Amino acid sequence: MRTVLSDKRMVAPAAGRKSVALAAACLSSLMFGLEISSVPVILPTLENVLRGNFRDMQWIMNAYTIACTTVLMAAGTLADRYGRRRLLLLRW
């Protein structure tokens, strides 16, 4: 790794920026995984409140998963078209 001396301190700008970018990408992936797994946690409560059966809960889970996957695919297409960095910064 190449470092640059500036004001008597060691600075590694490229490595720091890459680490932040990697952390942002990993955090985005983690949050999407948590979002998908949140629905099965609340299914028993939904079953009681909506007075549904197991079949109804499967429909809820499938609809939510399809909706999230559709958004993920659309975001990937936009990232390919306009740039991943620009899209990630737009989300924040």
Image (cartoon, rainbow, N blue to C red):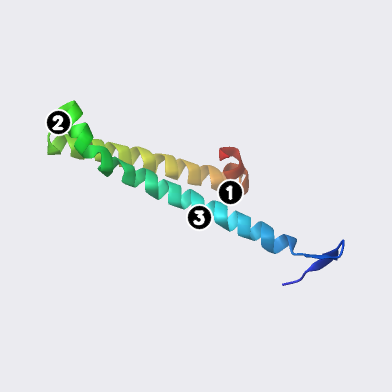
Residue type for callout 3: Cys
Residue 88 at x, y percent in the picture: 57, 45
Residue labelled with disc 1: 84
Instruction: Tell me, yes or no, whether the two marked residues, 3 and 1, touch with CB atoms within 8 Å.
Output: no
Residue furthest front as drawn: 8
Q: Does 14 appear above or below 84?
A: below
Q: Counting residues from the N terminus, which is met first, the one under dot 2 or under dot 1? A: 2
Q: Residues within 10 Å of mark 3 (few under 14, many from 20)?
A: few
Q: Counting residues from the N terminus, which is met first, the one under dot 3 or under dot 1? A: 3
* Left or right of residue 48: residue 22: right
Q: Residue at x 58, y 42 (%)?
A: 87
Residue labelled with disc 2: 52
Q: State which quadrant residue 36 falls in.
A: top left
85 and 57: which is toward the camera: 57
Residue 58 at x, y percent in the picture: 19, 40
Residue type for callout 2: Gly
Residue 25 at x, y percent in the picture: 53, 53
Q: Residues within 10 Å of mark 1 (few under 14, many from 20)?
A: some
Instruction: Tell me, yes or no, whether the two marked residues, 2 and 3, touch with CB atoms within 8 Å.
Output: no
Badge 3 marks a residue whose secondary structure is helix
